Structures are given as C-alpha cells and as structure tokens.
Image (tube, rainbow, N blue to C red):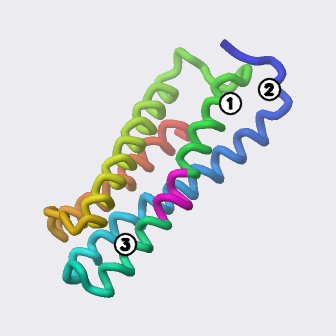
Amino acid sequence: MVIAALAPFYHVELAFHIVCFTAWMAGLFYLPRLYVYHCQVPAGSAESARFKVMERRLLKQIMNPAMIATWFFGILLVLTPGAVDWTAAWWWTKLIGVILMSGFHGACSKWRKNFLNDRNVKSEKFYRIANEVPTLLFLVIVFAVVA
C-alpha cells in the first residue's frame, strides 16, 4: 500500500528519518557506555544516583522519542510511492537490522531498570561488549541502504 499524497514530501520524510535515526544511534552508542561507568561505582552512592539520572534522561528524553520518530518517518517512507522496492534485498536487511536495533533498545531499557533498583548483575565487561552491538547493527543498516 502506498499513499500518493506523500510523494511530494519524500525528501522531507527522508531528512527527518535520518535526523531521528542519528539521535537514536547517539543514545544507543552512549547508554551502554554509561552502564560501564555505572558498574564502577558502589550501589547507593552519590555517583550511582548521578548515573541513574543521566541514564533516565538519555533514555526517556532522547532515545525513546528518537526511536519512535525514526519508526514513524520510516513507515511514512514505506508508504511513499517509489521509496521502497519490495523485491530488493536491502529493504529486508534494513528492516531486520532496525527490528534488532529496537530489541537492543529494549534490552538497554531493562538494564536501566536493574541499575535503578540496584539489582544489576551484569559485569562491566558485559556492557563493554554490549556497547559494540549498536555499531555492528548501524553498519548493517547503513550498508544495506547505501551499498
């Protein structure tokens, strides 16, 4: 299904999609790094409280709205005539990458709740490794679209 009335707005939709995706990715690059640092401070300390505020603000005020807007403008693009070739592999690769990225976002949210309740059981090393996941998915998504 496509909506012909969206065709004149293709470039605007695309620009907003790219801007929102960039903001979302910035948060996904930074939040697991905050978790690495959060692991290094004692639970209940002033430093831990500061990390909890930073993590909440990053997730709730930047990442969640950016993810929602990325999906919104992405769906508008899909509904725009000529924006997607449904037979092309790039489209399906990108979609799978974005779904996985959304799942990682959900995992980050769960980890934040564990830190918030002083129930984190994951190691600093775990979060260092997790910090690489958005980079790999970012590469898959961008190369699927561009190359």
Q: Quadrant of residue 101?
A: top left
Q: Position of residue 87 (x, y in %)?
A: 53, 15
What residue does disc 2 label?
Answer: 6
Q: Is residue 33 above or below residue 87?
A: below
Q: Nearer the viewer, residue 50 or 89?
A: 50
How far apart are the two marked residues, 3 and 2, measured between alpha carbons?
41 Å
Q: For the view shown, which residue lies furthest in the top direction?
A: 1
> Image check: 50 left or right of 73?
left
Identified at 36% across, 50% down, the residue is: 136
- What segment is highlighted magenta in the picture? 58-64
What's under tag 1, amino acid-wise?
Leu
Identified at 21% across, 78% down, the residue is: 43
Mark 3 lies on a secondary structure that is helix
Q: Is label 1 in contact with label 2 (beta carbons under 8 Å)?
A: yes
What residue does disc 3 label?
Answer: 52
What residue does disc 1 label?
Answer: 76
What's under tag 2, amino acid-wise?
Leu
Q: Is residue 47 above or below residue 12?
A: below
Q: Nearer the viewer, residue 66 or 110?
A: 110
Mark 1 lies on a secondary structure that is helix
Q: Is residue 123 above or below residue 49?
A: above
